[in-house]
Image (cartoon, helix red, strand yellow):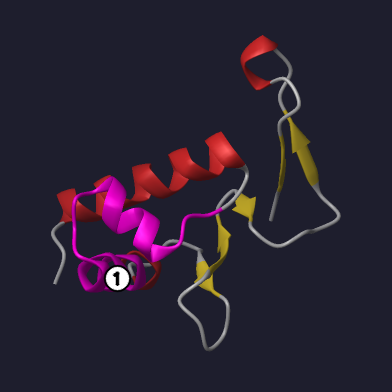
């Protein structure tokens, strides 16, 4: 079972990847970002989603479908941030 600190690091890594790329990381990306094995990355992602945050995995997969406030799959809600560091970036919201 993951510690609160491990879940916090995973949350920050997932959120950072979504903000940077507009896409949720695969558990293998999470494992690489946090220096874990692939199995540990998958288990940590599943524990993070099961921790009570309103995130979910696409049914029957280990792929993030939604990670608040972002939705990984397209929705009618688009979020854009103005400013040079965010030029051309947009995300889908829940």
Q: Residue at x 80, y 43 (%)?
A: 78
Q: Residue extending furthest right? A: 76
Q: Which is the main secondary structure of the residues drawn in magenta?
A: helix
Residue 10 x/y as whole percent = 30, 52
x, y percentage for residue 25?
Answer: 47, 55
Which quadrant, please, contains the N terminus? bottom left
Q: Residues within 10 Å of mark 1 (few under 14, many from 20)?
A: some
**Quadrant for the C terminus in the image:** bottom right
Above or below, comparing residue 86 to residue 40 in the picture: above
Q: Is residue 4 magenta?
A: no
Residue 66 relative to residue 80: left or right: left
- The residue that appears at 45% across and 76% down in the rendered structure is 62
Q: Which residue is mark 1?
A: 47
How many numbered marks are there?
Answer: 1
User: Which residue is at a point 86% across and 55% down the rendered structure image?
Assistant: 76
Q: Residue at x 74, y 17 (%)?
A: 82
- Left or right: 36, with 73 as reference point: left
Q: Which residues are magenta?
A: 24-46
Extreme top residue here?
84
Secondary structure of the residue carrying tag 1 is helix
In this rendering, would 53 be left or right of 88?
Answer: left
Q: Height in image: 48 above or below 13?
A: below
């Amino acid at each position: 079972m993951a510690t609160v600190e491990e879940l916090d690091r995973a949350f920050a890594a997932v959120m950072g990847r979504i903000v940077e790329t507009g896409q949720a990381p695969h558990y293998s990306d999470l494992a690489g970002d946090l220096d874990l094995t692939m199995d540990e990355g998958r288990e940590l992602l599943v524990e993070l989603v099961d921790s009570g945050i309103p995130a979910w995995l696409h049914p029957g997969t280990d792929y993030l479908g939604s990670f608040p406030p972002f939705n990984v799959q397209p929705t009618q809600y688009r979020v854009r941030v103005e400013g040079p560091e965010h030029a051309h970036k947009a995300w889908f919201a829940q």
